[in-house]
Image (tube, grey):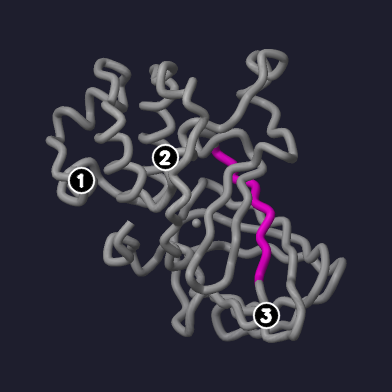
Amino acid sequence: MPPESTIRPNNRRELARDNDDTINPTALLEIDDRVGGEIRDLRKAKDMTIAELSQETSLSQGYISQIERGVSRPSIKALHSISRALGVTISWFFPPTSDDDDNLRDIVVRSQKRRRLRFSSGITDELLSPSLGNQLELLRCVFNPGAESGPTPYTHRGEEAGIIISGELQLWVGAKHVVLHEGDSFAFKSNLPHRYANKSDGDTIVIWSITPPSY
């Protein structure tokens, strides 16, 4: 879903630190314009400005802007700094691909190649949509027992909807509170104060859609 102080209150959850920065060594030779676009899309999804990203990474705003526009290619050191500030590992920008999938990368996500965000709250998000650059974000969310978005409701622009694949999810939207079970679905405008939690003894899995993308 960096230092946790960089996550805005209206973002979905607090990120857990993840030390797995390993990537395919050949990926180091393939830093291209696509990486800049991935940085821009993730930054915008987190509602972070270039100035804020510059402050967190100690990289100049001009350099970050050039990276996002594909004018400059980031060094590995710069990419590490950017990935940590955005709450992902460097491998986020180098999802494993095969030659057969190169032409499908913009429309297909293979099940074994999903990008993941793990949160200190006990929630893991798997990105099912190919990128955050379009108008729809599709996630597979796993809530460990006791996991929650936080005790305080939050708001953001857009709309969201989902379906409970397994387990139980408690959802608060405005003054309404509902307990959802396997097969139940939901939808609401994200500008309504909302939060959610798994208060059961087992994992809960939800397929969750958000428009526009927002972390």
Residue 192 at x, y percent in the picture = 51, 70
Q: Nearer the viewer, residue 95 or 34?
A: 95
Q: Nearer the viewer, residue 2 or 71?
A: 2
Q: Amino acid at mark 2?
A: Ile
- Residue 135: give its label: none
Residue 116 at x, y percent in the picture = 57, 49
Image point (40%, 17%), residue name: 32
- Residue 40 in which image quadrant: top left
Disc nearest the viewer among 2 and 3: 2
- Residue 41 in magenta stretch: no
Image point (73%, 34%), residue name: 110
User: Are circles 1 and 3 on residues that touch, CB within 8 Å?
Assistant: no
Residue 126 at x, y percent in the picture = 63, 50
Crowding at dot 2, Cα within 10 Å, few <14 / some 14-19 / many 20+, comes out as some
Element under label 3? loop
Q: Which residues are magenta?
A: 135-143
Residue 170 at x, y percent in the picture = 68, 80
Earlier sequence position, callout 2 versus callout 1: 1
Report the residue marked by disc 2. Answer: 90
Crowding at dot 1, Cα within 10 Å, few <14 / some 14-19 / many 20+, comes out as many
> Is residue 105 shown above or below 49?
above
Q: Amino acid at mark 3?
A: Pro
Report the residue marked by disc 1. Answer: 57
Report the residue marked by disc 3. Answer: 145
> Is residue 147 shown above or below 80?
below
Per the picture, the main secondary structure of the magenta-coloured stretch is strand
